Image (tube, grey):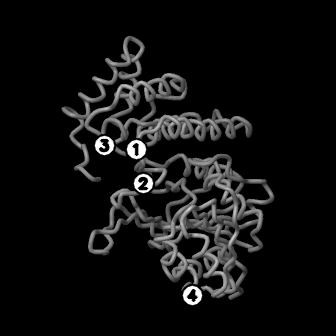
Amino acid sequence: MPSPLVTVIIPVYNLAPYLETTIQSLVGQTYPNTELLFVNDGSTDNSAEILKAAAEKYPNIRSLHQENAGQGAARNNGLDNATGEFVLFLDGDDWLDPVTLERAVEAALKENADIVCFGYKSVKKQADGKLEELYKFEYDPAVFHEDLVSCFLAENTVRKDAVNTATLGKLYKRSLIETHHIRFRQRIFEDSPFMLEAVYHATRLTCISGYFYYYLQRGTEGEASTMNSGFRADKVALFYQADQQMKSFLLSKGVWSRYRNDFSRYHNARVIIYGGYFELYRYSHAATKEAYRAFIKLLQKHSADLGWERASLFKTYRKRVPVLHIGLFLSRISPRLADRYFRTYEKKYAFDRPSSGN
């Protein structure tokens, strides 16, 4: 079997305690032909020194450096310097199973695929250093159909052909990215707009079964990643911006009417997950006045995209779509009234409130 070059792009920002695990998972791949691009995004810890030492030790490692500009810009830097036929993105605190690249390239060549998707496990480290599995996601290669945008918008639904919309767990043909000038458009929540453009332009997507990507949740170690760092109005605003980018993309391609309901269902679930609702009302006992007012202000600002579509969504999200609408209505009378309604619902009626620490 031919061994085309695979470029792995790894953005790094203050990840010194985790880099060795990531590095070893890459240099230990069974696939023989790799280019490992670590992009140091202005780290203030000793990440740069670790990367320098790794580059001196392993000839397939290159270390790039930039002023802090966010994960999206770091990935773009990697893309601008990549030379591989295929590209894979890995975060600097995550790691891959040793056979990941071998299996993914094999599938790409066999199926002539622009994108190869594979499963992942979300894990966290316990106090004794052992890993606890929090969640796992696996693809069924037999269920995918040709409408890849529909599969993309099926995230958070019970559909078996849903494509995870993060960039993790995927191998991309670099020509797909470069031909269509696909890049990350913002600092955070950058994955989904990138993925939508990729699946829209892809001629073929294939999936392999199994779990190959290990996604480390660091919130219980006194550190918080972008995605689990609690409510911040600026972060939520960027979430809405990302969804607006996707809507604008569908409009620009003349397919908005085809996917409007699917997008509304997709967006409804994301408002709950990333728009501040879960952070303020499911994971917290009470929201501060400043926080709930910021949440409601953003919800009102983007209310035109909050639809009623909820069929096939996972139950956790499906049952909260009308809750959002009721709270939105109450917020126009009084933000405080909406806040009380949301808190009351989660306390007395949700029945799926996670335990402390989850």
Residue placed most toward the observer, 52 or 333: 52
Q: Check if mark 3's residue and mark 2's residue have beta carbons within 8 Å.
A: no
User: For the residue labelled by badge 4, is the local secondary structure a helix, a strand or a loop?
Assistant: loop
Tell me the residue that label 3 is attached to.
283
Q: Check if mark 3's residue and mark 1's residue have beta carbons within 8 Å.
A: no
For marks 3 and 2, the one nearer the N-term is: 2
Q: x%, y% of residue 240?
A: 55, 36
3 or 1: mark nearer the eye: 1
Q: Image quarter for residue 319?
A: top left
User: For the residue labelled by badge 1, is the local secondary structure a helix, a strand or a loop?
Assistant: loop
Q: Check if mark 2's residue and mark 1's residue have beta carbons within 8 Å.
A: yes
User: For the residue labelled by badge 3, is the local secondary structure a helix, a strand or a loop?
Assistant: loop
Tell me the residue that label 2 is attached to.
224
Q: Please determine whether, in this image, residue 298 is positioned above or below residue 50.
A: above
Q: Is residue 182 left or right of residue 101?
A: right
Residue in view at x 54 percent, y 65 percent: 45
Residue placed most toward the observer, 257 or 175: 175
Q: Check if mark 4's residue and mark 1's residue have beta carbons within 8 Å.
A: no
4 or 1: mark nearer the eye: 1
Tell me the residue that label 4 is attached to.
30
Q: Report the Cα–Cα distance between label 3 and label 1.
A: 9 Å
Residue in view at x 46 percent, y 38 percent: 232
Q: Please determine whether, in this image, residue 348 is positioned above or below residue 49.
A: above
For marks 4 and 3, the one nearer the N-term is: 4
Q: Report the Cα–Cα distance between label 2 and label 1.
A: 8 Å
